[in-house]
Image (spheres, rainbow, N blue to C red):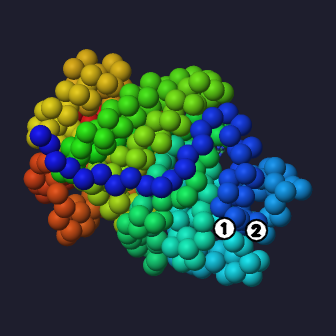
Amino acid sequence: MASYEYNESNQRVLFGEESLSKLPSELSKLGCTKPLILTTPSKASYVDDVAKLLSGQIHVAGSFTRVTMHTPKEVTEEALEYSTSVDADCFVSIGGGSAVGLGKALFVRTGLPHICIPTTYAGSEMTPIVGQTENRVKVTHVDRKAIPAVVIYDVKLTLTLPANISATSGLNAMAHAVEALYAPDANPITSTFAIKGIQTLSTSLPQIMQNPKDIAARSDALLGAWLCGKCLAGASISLHHKLCHVLGGTFNLPHAETHAIILPHALAYLAPSIPGVMKELAENIPDSDGNAVNGLNKLLSKLGITYSLKDLGMKEEGIDLAVETLLQKPFWSPRTIEKDAVRELLKRAWDGQPAQ
Ligand code: NAD
C-alpha cells in the first residue's frame, strides 16, 4: 500500500457565475469591515465594481492599483504603508497572479485576512508560495498560512481576459500539473487533480481562442486553473519551473509566456525517464497521437504561441548563462540535468523550433 503525505488547507472556495456578489457576506463572515482592494493598473475599474457591490454594507478602506508582476519588495512596502495609513483590516486581491501575489505578501507582513478573486488562470490563489523580487532577484518561500482564506472564482470576470493572456496563463497552470505528475512527492490526490486539470485546460483553452466569450469554456478553464494550482501546492517542482525561474529572474522575461514556451521542451527532455507519465499525458492531451510532446506542440500552435525566447527579447549568449545558473542550485529531476542537453533544449526554445 502506498504511503504519502498531503497538506489540506482551510481555504473556502466559491465558484460560479456572479459569485462575486457573495463578497459582502464573505467579508462579514471574517469580521472584516475595512477592506483594501488590490489590483493591476489596467484593471483599476475593478475598484469601482467592488466598491459598488459593497456600497451601503461595507466601507472600502482604500485601493492600491499599482500591483506589479513578481511582487517587487518596494511595491509591497508602498502598499503596506498605505494599508496602515487607511487602517485596513483585510485585503481583497482581484486580478491575475500579480494581484494575488501582493495579497499574499501583505498577509505575510500583517496577518490580516486575504480574500482573493482570480481573473486569470495562473493558479497562485491555491498555493502557499510567496514571492518577492529585490534588486532584480526573485526569491520564493513556502508559508502554508499564506494560502488565501477565501477564493471567489467568478467566471464572468474572466470574459474580458484577452485570448493571448488566457492561453499563456492557462499553460502556466498546466505546467504546475505536468510537473506534479513526476514529482518525487506525487500522490494519488495531486495526480488526480493534475490529470483533470490538464484535460480541462487543454480542451477549453482552444475553445476560448475561438470565442473568448464562451462561458462554458471559461468556466472549465477556471476549474482547470484551480486544480492545477492545487498541484503546485501539493507536489514539488522540477526542471520546468526551475528553468522558468532562471529565465524570468536573469533576463526579466515575462512569466506566463516563458512558461508557455518552455513546457513542451522541458517535458521532451524528461520524457525518456518518465514513460508512464508520458503515456498518461498522451491519453489526456488532445491530438497527441501517442506522444504528449506532439500534443503540447499542437496545443501551443492552436493557442497562437508561435513565438520563441528570442522573440521575448533574450539574447543568444544568455543561453550559456541560463544553463550555468540552473546548474548552480541542484534540484531533484527524474532525468539527470546534463549541461549539453539542457543547452540544446534552451537553444530550441530560443530559436522557436518545436520541442522533440
Ligand atoms: P498578471 O497578474 O500580471 O496579469 C496579466 C495582465 O492581465 C495584467 O495586465 C492584468 O491587469 C490583466 N488581467 C488580469 N485579469 C484580467 C481580466 N479578467 N481581463 C482583462 N485583463 C486582465 O499575470 P498572471 O499570469 O496571472 O500572473 C503572473 C504572476 O503570478 C507572476 O508574478 C508569477 O510569479 C505569479 N504566480 C505565482 C504563483 C504562486 O504560486 N505563487 C503561481 C503562478 C503565478
x, y percent for residue 205: 49, 30
Residue 116 vertical placement versus 176 (above, below): below
Q: Residue at x 20, y 34 (%)?
A: 277
Q: Is residue 268 visible?
A: yes
Q: Quadrant of residue 354?
A: top left
From the viewer's side, name the closer residue of 266 and 222. 222
Q: Give the residue number, with chain letter if any, for mark 1.
A: 90
The mark tally for this picture is: 2
Q: Is residue 114 above or below residue 156?
A: below
**Residue 214: which disc?**
none
Mark closest to the chain's N terminus, 2 or 1? 2
Q: Residue furthest right?
A: 56
Which amino acid type corresponds to the residue marked 1 in the rendered image?
Cys
- Give the camera-side residue of 341 and 195: 195
Query: Is residue 340 visible in this depiction of the protein?
Result: no
From what the image shows, is residue 52 above or below residue 74? above
Compared to 29, does 272 lie above or below?
Answer: above
Q: Secondary structure at mark 1?
A: strand
Return the x and y of residue 275 as percentages of the image width and height.
Answer: 13, 33
Q: Secondary structure at mark 2?
A: loop
Residue appearing at x 81%, y 49% in the figure:
53
Q: For label 1, count other residues whose C-alpha is less than 10 Å away and answer few (under 14), some (14-19) or many (20+).
A: many
Q: Amino acid at mark 2?
A: Lys
Residue 31, quarter of the rendered image? bottom right
Quadrant placement of the N terminus:
top left
The answer as to whether callout 2 falls within 8 Å of ligand 1 is no
353 relative position to 136: left or right: left
- Which residue does the numbered mark 2 point to in the structure image? 34
Q: Position of residue 219 (x, y in %)?
A: 57, 31
State if disc 1 and disc 2 touch (CB < 8 Å).
yes
Taking the image as shown, residue 56 lies to the left or right of residue 106, namely: right
